[in-house]
Amino acid sequence: MPAAETDPLSFLRVRELTWLDLVLPPDTLAALRSLAALAPAGGLTAVVSGEAGVGKTIAVRTLAEELRLDTWRVDCRMLVELHGASTPAALPGLFAVAERPHAVVLLHDAEWLWEEGAGGAADRVLELAGGRRPPTVLESRAPELPAGVADLPHVRVPFPDEEARAELWRRLSWRAHPLAALDVRRLAAVHVPGAAIEDALERVIDDAGGAEPDTERLLAALRRPP
């Protein structure tokens, strides 16, 4: 197996994102902006939570880019599966990598850190995060947070409603194939998160050899697993 597939740490390339790129309710966007306002004081540790595919990672990356910082992503599931109860001892080395470029640490699937077999990794994260200047963000799908983590500034990214899904279809389809004529309302009626919309577009365009996607094929792609 290639080494990259067993490395829980990865660098997320800059995508030149701004707040205008996010399709979120005004109160959620305001909460993210509030985190950005807290960051210059240093030591910011926060939680961004929500269901799978709703845009948690893109929200954190946008926060980082607004602060003119890079982002290092830690795959917490992989980390805990690799190290188990020794996970706390592995964390300082990962944080040290992110210190050199002065970057945001994004702890993806952070709920793995408070699993019983993780050796108290969540507490160690809070210790390490408090001693660094750039932000540390725990990204989680967990509906409930453990003590300590629950006290952190917290932004919950909601599942997109039909209006938000329609806007996601407009934006993502324009980027993927600007001339595509789609029935956005029919597509937006399907209850899926933004990641599923992006995935369906990519699969249909790839299957068609780059040709213009159509509504029927996209609806079929939404209803079958990737």
Image: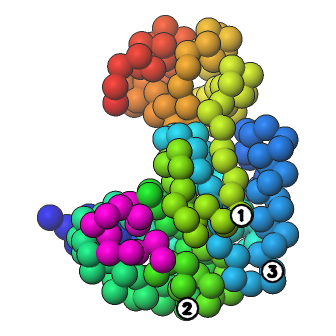
In which quadrant of the rendered image does the N terminus lie? Answer: bottom left
Give the residue type at disc 1: Pro
Which residue is the site of mark 1? 153
Q: Residue at x 70, y 53 (%)?
A: 155
Q: Residue at x 49, y 66 (%)?
A: 107
Q: Residue at x 68, y 11 (%)?
A: 185
Residue 3's place in the image compared with 128, above or below, is above
Which residue is the site of mark 3? 40
| Tag in front: 3 or 2 | 3
Q: Is residue 62 left or right of residue 128?
A: right
Which residue is the site of mark 2? 100
- On the image, the x and y values in percent for residue 114 come to 41, 64
SS at badge 2 = loop
Give the residue type at disc 3: Pro
Give whichever of discs 3 and 2 has the lower sequence position.
Answer: 3
Residue stretch rendered in magenta on the structure: 112-123
Q: Is residue 77 left or right of residue 144?
A: left
The crowding category of the residue bearing disc 2, from other C-alpha atoms within 10 Å (few below 14, some 14 to 19, many at least 20), is: few
Q: Is residue 181 visible?
A: no
**Marks 1 and 3, how far apart in space?**
15 Å
